[in-house]
Amino acid sequence: MRTGPHLPAGHVPSGSGPHGDGGAPAPDVTVVVIAYNDARRLPRAVGSALRQSLDGVEVVVVDDGSRDGTGPLAERLADELPGRVRAVRLPVNSGGCGRPRNAGVERARGRYVMFLDSDDVLDRHACLNLLTAAEDTGADLVSGLCARVRVDRGRARESFWYPWLYQRTAVYGSLRDNPDLLYDTLATNKLYRRGFLERSGLRFVEHLHYEDLLFTAEAYLAAARTALIPHRVYNWLVEPSARSISNRRSDLANFADRLEIHRRIDALLSRHGDERLRLVKDAKFVKHDLLLYVRELRHRDAAYRQGFCALAAEYLAGLDPRVFDAAPPMAAIVAYLLREGDHEAALAAAEYRGKRPVLSTELTRCDGRVYWGRRCPSSAEGRRILDVTHLGLHRCRLSELRPLNTVTELVVKNGRVRLSGRVLNPLGRVAPDADVSACLEVYDRRRPRRVFRLPAALTHAGNGLVWEAEFDPQRQIRPLGIVDPVWDVRLVLRVDGEGIVTRPSGLGLGDADPWEHVLLPVRPRFSRLTARSLRPCLTYRGSLAFVLHADGPAWRMAAAMARTRWGRRLRRGIRRMWAAVRRLFRAARRAATSRSTKTAVFNRVLSRLPVRTGTVVFESHLGRRYSGNPKYIHRELRRAEVPVRAVWSYDSSPQGFPEDAVLVRRGSWAYYWELARAQFWIDDQGFPDGLRKRPQTVYLQTWHGSAYKLMGEDQPRVKWAGRSERARLRRMVDRYDYFLVRSRHDVDTLVKGLGVRAELLPVGYPRNDPLVNGDPDAAAEAEALRRSLGLEDGRRVVLYAPTFRPGPDGRPVWYMDPPVEPGRFVRDLGDAMVLLLRPHYLCRMRLPAVAGDGVRDVGHVPDVTPLLLLADALITDHSSIMFDYALLDRPLILHVPDAAALGGGYFDLAEHAPGPVTRTEDELLAALADLDRVDADYAGRRRDFVRRFGEYDRGTAARAVVERFFTTVREGVRDG
Amino acid sequence: MAESRDVFIVCNNADGVGGLQRWAHHLARLLARRGHRVTLVGVTRASEPHDYEPDGSYAVVTLHEQWRPPALPWRPRSLRQRFDIAAYWRDLWRTRTLRQGAERLSELFAGARPGGVVIAAQVWAMEWVRAADTTGLKVIGMTHESYEATRRSSRYARVKELYADCDRMLALTAEDADAWARDGMTNAGHMPNPLHVAPRRLSTLDAPIVASVGRLATEKGVDLLLEAWARVASRQPGWLLRVYGAGPQEDELRRQAASLPEIATSVEFRGVVADVETALADSSIFVLPSRAEGFPMSVLEAMAYGLPTVAFDCAPGVRALVADGRDGLLVPPGDTAALAAALERLIEDDALRRAMGARARASVARYRPDVVLDRWERLFACLHRGESAVSEPMADETISDRRFGRPWPSSRRSTTAIPAAGAVEDDS
């Protein structure tokens, strides 16, 4: 019974009963399944519709004139399941999806209708979810998430169709409420009220491909209410081998059809008289439809390219030019250049994507801006669209550049190979007088560390670089044979010590295989029995690679053996075993170097080793910088010639850290080793959680600023988190032995909020000593910094140093913006002032390239104290830097554009502010223009501010700390 | 009138003290009143039973008088755990006992008429439902907490596994259902809890009393409330905070209240009260300081009595009930200063309090029992289309036929479990 076509008689409801065709009540949902020559997959699709958790779904199978038995199969299904399945056969194939779907809708009896293609599958709960949403919201049209499932070689890879539309259940009154709906142009992941289809006369257009696009646009416009649900409802199964109609883009008529559909949608939207909708649709065309085709152009022949570009240019010329602003920048460039007829640059823009995009066109620099393409755009529109200055290609490091590298010649002569090519030199980034060298590297794809390096000659030629390598492959490339079949090639350029890595590309050489008869003779280490030559070929992305030409007798035998059943099994077994071994090794390595292992070893083993007297571990801002209070304590130690062994922890790079100290990377074994044996821990934020400090070690927590923002347990986040988070904070804070404070305000706020129970040292902050006592070393450091920044032209220096802005998840927002538009600052105040931008150490400043030298990013300066010393005025928000800068008694402006972002603090900022509080750009510029008045007006309040928040800062903090803890070290007596 | 169905509500226990059991008995009574044949099944008995005074309109059955094997199935993680023979035997014992309980459940299910429905109210109880034979019945799984709360607990993996192929999975709010749907549970829908009080007397909103009702445990956040109250009390003398409920944190909270001089006299710990009506009708403001919630029934009650609510915006359930600024005030989680400010706003503004109270009372009409029951019956009708639903034999024979291919891409469920009815399995 299992495989037979018939059900047990007892299970089949009789056709004439109440459940027969005529008398059954109307089903809730009818699923229209269309099929063409797909008898193989049709039952799967029908099954998915019948198996719905919504009971009683009706299926109408429409066979679009198939010739492979799909029709009889559909009829058999209908016979077996009367009342559930009905079959419709169209006499002639229509060539599209439109007519069969229309035929299905005509025959549907359900209150709602869905469409399903024979090669796809519905989710089991699709009908119930869509129906529930339709009934809850009264919508005419309900849409759910569609998953694209690639099924090749048994593994399914999923991606979702515009998932950002489907984040939550939503109801829209009309398309105007959410024009982005136009992005989802599938007709299949939707449930339509049948009455709605009938009332508005909605049908699919026939004889054109992409009928979905027009149908959905019409449906969105006609629906009185549209609902979206986040449930996945439709599985669009993509089998790479089988090509469905919508996937045949190689035919030019296909693109023409798509344009025709878009023209009709344009007409439809124009009839509705909504410009905004039209713009959203056009932007979607530029960003989605057009790019889909352009990215494949490299693989098409010349005739197709010509035809395509003509069609596209014609359509694009008819679009509203505002579409170029509505679409994403690179897509807009593609569309604009296609319209203007610059196909090469358009193609380059379409290919410029991914994590490390390849730049395959020239760039132009005019009037300080950088433009895409080899010509400076003449029109204002062109300059606006083609402006790519924001990509920063004119000033990024050379190693971040990936210019196109085209192979121009590959010949084999007398056993020697000559391989040459040309690398773009965008904007002349590689100067003619630069010290350049090149090296061609051929490496094993499976084991990239196996590299053969071949020297190459490099010369400047026009606006590019020409390279040429000549080598003897038999001597210089030695593959093993069999186990390393593919060898990739890259060219490494060294320019003044910086490396540019490019992959030689074979695209653009023509359409046929450019190296059809080229073979490189090689001598594999497993002897020439395995292979005798390397064959050049193009990878999927068009890069040059060599493949071992499988022509050796041993290879052939091995290949033949591997093709047998036992060979396959053996191969699979070996591969699995190897994978298991590698997994095991990786897991072991992870376990051995994980933080929890290190913490456990620290607590159980390392902290039992004897303390090394005189060792001090310093850390500032979790190892990110050599700065802050620890730096100034270390300096004082050096100056007082206390014989300590200083250890500094760094986070990613040891650059900028003192050379006379032992440097350990934060989190490394050396770091834990030093922490365990240190006599002193000195930091300003916190050593890793979980480390148990032993009583013999003295932990001096210097902290990194007085508090305006709520700290520790006063923060809502910590209060909220419950016991574990508070316990973690408790553990961290209870390790402190001493805690530096700079005022009674600290004691009332910071100390209380963190729950510090350590001894408080009311000596002020060491980092603020130079601000008060005019320390010559620090002054010299500030002067050196002034010189290196080129700030000696007498203009006043204004420093902008805000704190971070918490994002929705509570973590800092990565990018910060200047407080005023840089161009405006330079125009208004550029003659008298320089604006230095100092982002919070967890953030980066977003500074446009146009700013010039009037506005500069000083995020790279490790220590902020010299910056404070050389700044004539400070702009900040509620950052703790105001407490430090106020000590200098120089003008200070609090710029708080978003008062709500302040939240609750420990005191009323406006009441105690040491300077004017500005809200807008205009107010800020006005305050800056009149800096002297600000200085005079607020002198009194500034002093009050210092008295209140910096009462212990007398310029002696570092000395006090050293005298308190380290004079005993000098005498050689163990402290603690 | 919808047709009469056999409905089984399966809980971990049917006689423990808790919101879930109260809900289960209430729903059973309501369904029975509509003519359904309801059986309330507790997998085991509670250690401290509470009498819910079943009125005999529905049956109450317990599967295991006592559950002694380990609560959860054995999931060895490391190699060493895999060789733990004792744990292996304990798990074997658990499986055997569970099977006995499931057989008992199967017998109950076998007596059901066509069109019956099983509602597994909790994840643990779902294990028994899955092990039982549910042929001809539809299975509905429920989660009575917010998605985020489940996500943080060990229940998450079990929900994903055990609920993947039931016919419907019900969260408490639409927002939670959306979250489950995004997480790949395509059977997710939502069903609110019905209002279970019928006020005879409404609050006059005159008494200077703020009420909080809930277990005194960390997740209910009464410590945060006391902290906020310290700010309020000093500025609003004459107002009282009444904390109803008992729990593990009680002593600690009493100590906290006593240590803050400004609130020592203005906080009353009232313990557990039987008469919720007096407690709520005598107050003017309801406050919910919870750190985590599902669908807080206490807020539903308070709204029914016409109280405006002040709460931390901690869960979709709270947002679904209280529309900020309409029938109550929501403040950012953990922000005690904002909680205090919101309380003060309602204390000082009589008109606002009255307006919000009135709107709250009107708004809970969405959760009137008949409205919620209609929703339940609509769901039942979708899953079982009356007599025409002859799809069961199909499910067994035709669909599992190879011609229909694999159900795509339904969860890869373990093969050990006995398939629940309706959850159509293929034969691979």
Image (tube, coloured by chain):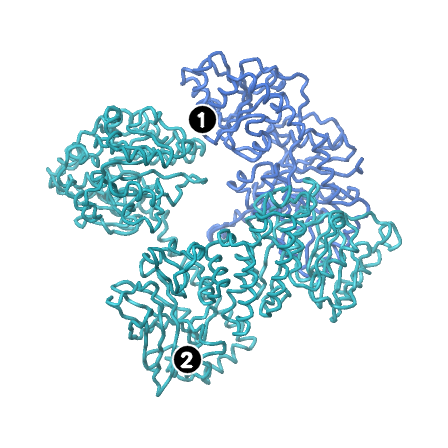
Chain colours: A cyan, B blue
Direction from residue A4 to residue B365 in the image, left or right: left
Residue at left offset 68%, top offset 60% = A117
Image coords of residue A789 (percent x, y): 22, 48
Q: Which residue is mark 2?
A: A534
Image coords of residue A419 (percent x, y): 36, 78
Q: Quadrant of the N terminus of chain A?
A: bottom right
Front residue (pair A525, A541): A541
The amino acid type found where label 1 is placed reads Thr
Q: Chain of mark 2?
A: A
Q: Which residue is mark 1?
A: B336
Vertical order, A532 against B207 (above or below) = below
Which secondary structure lies at badge 1? helix
Is residue B135 in sight in this rendering? no
Q: Chain of mark 1?
A: B
Toward the front, the furthest residue is A379
Q: Label 2 vs label 1: CA separation?
A: 72 Å
Vertical order, A649 against B309 (above or below) = below
Front residue (pair A58, B184): A58
Is residue B181 in sight in this rendering? yes
